[in-house]
Image: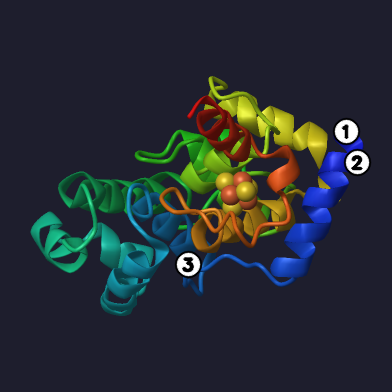
Amino acid sequence: MKMSLKVERIENYLEELYPDAYCELHYTKDYELLLAVMLSAQTTDKRVNQVTHVLFQKYDTLEKLKGASVSDLEKIIKEIGTYHKKALFLKEIATILVDEFDGKMPYDRKELESLPGVGRKTVNVVLGELGVEPAIAVDTHVERVSKRLMLAKDDDSVLEVEKKLQKSFKKECWVKRHHQLIFFGRYHCKAIKPDCENCKLKDFCRETKKKKKVLARK
Ligand code: SF4
């Protein structure tokens, strides 16, 4: 099947399943989104929302967050992974934004990536979600699903996956496709026990091909 037809079928199926896919992290201020995405590494959005519900109420300005004790931040976010490091990042980011950016979050990719604990994936989520620039953030779900659907190779790096997805989808759809691929990986094509029986994308799925090969050998 031609790549463009395959991509069209994937897009149609994502639209059918998740026409309104969205960012599941809770935030009311732009910098809160940045902090929430940073906190979401190696944990679920649900857990992040539970801790940020308390964190963003208690420390409702960057100045207050800058003045917080790391031990109190650790206490608030201890339910999520690597919380020692993340508590330090929270305080450091708030300090830098207050001292060097006049208390505002920058919208420049390089400036954002210079912040502690903030990498390319986090910046892609933030800039895409806030409508600053189209972006596809490749998290664990997006990477797994893209490789299973042969939109990328098994040994591609995260950056290579991102570049291939950018080529596959129209730029104006990048943010939506990013959310849809996350929903697809989170609720349908799960890491363990994906719902292959009810999946309309079996025909060009690497996982299905692997299973068929194993069955043929038996
Ligand atoms: Fe995922 Fe299974 Fe569908 Fe392949 S067939 S995309 S592994 S749910």
Label 1 or label 3, whichever lies nearer to me, is 1
The residue labelled by disc 1 is 1
Residue 124: image x %, image y %?
Answer: 60, 44
**Is 73 located above or below residue 164 in the figure?**
below
The residue carrying pointer 2 sits among few (fewer than 14), some (14 to 19) or many (20 or more) residues within 10 Å by Cα, namely few
Can see residue 67? yes
Could you tell me which residue is drawn at 63 percent across and 30 percent down? 161
The residue carrying pointer 1 sits among few (fewer than 14), some (14 to 19) or many (20 or more) residues within 10 Å by Cα, namely few
- In this rendering, the count of numbered labels is 3
The residue labelled by disc 3 is 25
Residue 135: image x %, image y %?
Answer: 69, 44
Tell me which amino acid carries mark 2.
Leu
Could you tell me which residue is drawn at 42 percent across and 41 percent down? 118
Q: Secondary structure at mark 3?
A: loop
Residue 186: image x %, image y %?
Answer: 50, 59
Q: Is residue 5 left or right of residue 138?
A: right
Label 1 or label 2, whichever lies nearer to me, is 1
The residue labelled by disc 2 is 5
Q: For this rendering, which residue is in front, 216 or 205?
A: 216
